[in-house]
Image: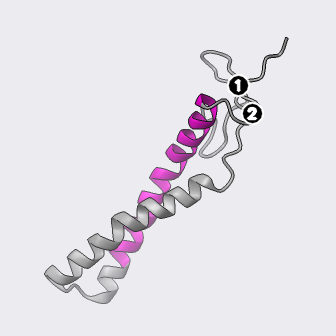
Amino acid sequence: MMRSYLKVRDTCPVCGEELFHHRADDGPAYLTILIVGHLMAPLMLFVFTQWRPDPLTSATVFSVACVALSLFLLPRLKGVLVGVQWSKRMHGFGQDDG
């Protein structure tokens, strides 16, 4: 479905379904922030209460983890949003051409 990191193809290369109708906008970014925040905050609290790491070490490790998880989730969540729009026939996905 994707032709690059966040660009959706105009049509599906397998079935020919038109995908240019999608309106993902800020939804994937919002969901990514929501998920990463809900995963990392309890983890940060657990690590701090169990081991009391140096603040610089903790900030470095969790910053890298947040960025890596965000970069992993963002294109997948965009695909999910486009898929949901397609399945619900939103934004022109269900229109007949003839």
Q: Which residue is mark 2?
A: 20
**61 left or right of 4?**
left
SS at mark 1? Answer: loop
Where in the figure is residue 34, as x and y percent of width and height?
47, 63
Residue 43 lies left or right of residue 21; in this view the side is left
Residue 11: which quarter of the image?
A: top right
Asked which quadrant contains residue 14, the reply is: top right
Position of 25 with respect to 40 (left or right) is right
- Of the residues shown, which amino acid type is indicated by label 1? Thr
Magenta residues, start to end: 60-87
Q: At 68% across and 20% down in the image, what residue appears? A: 17
Q: Residue 74, percent across and down?
A: 53, 52
Query: Which residue was labeled with disc 1?
Result: 11
Residue that sits furthest to the right in the current view: 98
Label number found at residue 52: none
Instruction: Name which of mark 1 and mark 2 comes first in the sequence.
Output: 1
Location of residue 93 in the rendering, given as x and y in whole percent from the top left corner: 71, 28
- Quadrant of the image occupied by residue 94: top right
At label 2, the amino acid type is: Phe
- Measured along the vertical axis of the image, is residue 30 above or below residue 8? below
The reply to whether dot 1 and dot 2 touch (C-beta < 8 Å) is yes
C-alpha span from label 1 to label 2: 7 Å
Q: Quick one: quadrant of the C terminus?
A: top right
> What sort of colour scheme is used for the picture?
one colour
**Front one among 28 and 52:** 28
